[in-house]
């Protein structure tokens, strides 16, 4: 089984929207998730517990006592990634190309359009004979009808992922050698981001990508802490910034640019 922990970064005042996720390799299972939470608790806390870590809370300066906790959790990702345990992927889309409220995108159903981004993020990384449990940061939805709720939207996302995966397998049945497949996505549930360090890692890495793509690093009033952390992430990849796109199967630090004109549904 694979565990996937996801979050969003809508960059409300910027050009690009992002969603991203951390994949935990199936051999490690739930034990790794629990052990990782405990490890973070024991190594990231100082005089008082460090709470909800996310990109918007990166300390303003590198001398801030909590900055090293953010740097350490980034280094944890690259350490686990080098051991083939943990993977990161983020999807980027230009808001001009993908307006959730526009009629051409799911008849203006904002939530359908939003959760489609998670579908696009996850779909191409689903593999036959694997099972997936997905945990997405809890959010308040924009109701399209009275009974609308987050659980309903997550259920729809699960159905969509499984259906699209089955369609893909059937389309390339000549390659896979069979047509019938078991639904790969077993569960999708919401989790409070403040309670899951794995969701927080996804947020921090994704936030750094959005930081560069939205040209925040070029602003005169840029925060020293964010700039240093974003550059630290890039330096781990042998780059000066994170403004690049990877191959779809890149497991080091995957950046996927979504073009809605190629696939609306």
Image (cartoon, helix red, strand yellow):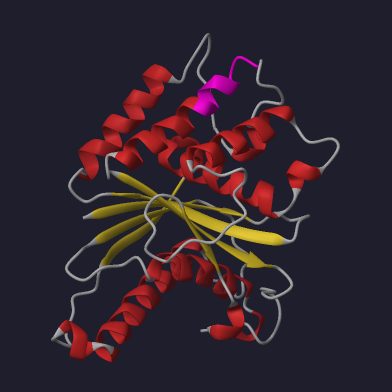
113 lies above or below 136: below
Q: Point out the stretch of residues depicted in magenta.
A: 64-71
Task: Pick the quarter of the image with the N terminus.
Answer: bottom left
The residue depicted at 74 percent of the width and 72 percent of the height is: 96
Where residue 93 appears, x then y in whole percent?
62, 67
* Residue 140 falls within the magenta-colored stretch: no
Residue 219: image location, x then y, percent? 82, 42
Q: Residue 154: where, in percent of width, then height?
A: 43, 65
Q: Is residue 146 visible in the rendered structure shown here?
A: no
Identify the residue at horizontal 54%, vertical 37% (top origin): 235
Residue at 61% x, 69% y is 143
Q: Is residue 181 left or right of residue 141?
A: left
* Image-based side of 41 in relation to 59, left or right: left
Splitting the image into 4 quarters, where does residue 33 fall? top left
Residue at 53 percent of width and 68 percent of height:
117
Tell me if I can see residue 127 in this picture: yes
The total number of labels drawn is 0
């Amino acid at each position: 089984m694979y565990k996937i922990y996801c979050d969003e970064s809508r960059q409300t005042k910027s050009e690009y929207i992002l969603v991203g996720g951390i994949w935990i390799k199936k051999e490690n299972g739930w034990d790794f998730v629990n052990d990782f939470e405990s490890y973070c608790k024991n190594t990231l806390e100082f005089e008082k517990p460090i709470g909800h870590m996310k990109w918007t809370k990166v300390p303003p300066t590198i001398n801030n006592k909590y900055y090293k906790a953010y740097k350490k959790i980034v280094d944890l990702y690259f350490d686990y990634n080098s051991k083939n345990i943990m993977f990161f992927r983020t999807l980027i889309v230009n808001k001009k190309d993908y307006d959730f409220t526009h009629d051409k995108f799911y008849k203006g159903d904002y939530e359908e359009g939003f959760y489609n981004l998670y579908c696009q993020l996850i779909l191409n990384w689903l593999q036959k004979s694997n099972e997936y449990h997905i945990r997405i940061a809890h959010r308040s939805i924009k109701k399209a009808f009275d009974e609308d709720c987050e659980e309903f939207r997550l259920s729809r996302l699960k159905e969509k992922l499984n259906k699209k995966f089955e369609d893909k397998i059937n389309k390339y049945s000549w390659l896979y050698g069979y047509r019938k497949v078991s639904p790969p996505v077993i569960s999708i549930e919401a989790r409070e981001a403040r309670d899951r360090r794995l969701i927080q890692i996804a947020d921090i890495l994704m936030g750094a990508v959005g930081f560069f793509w939205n040209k925040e690093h070029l602003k005169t009033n840029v925060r020293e802490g964010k700039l240093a952390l974003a550059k630290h992430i890039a330096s781990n990849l042998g780059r000066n910034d994170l403004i690049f796109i990877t191959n779809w199967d890149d497991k080091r630090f995957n950046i996927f640019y979504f073009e809605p004109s190629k696939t609306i549904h």
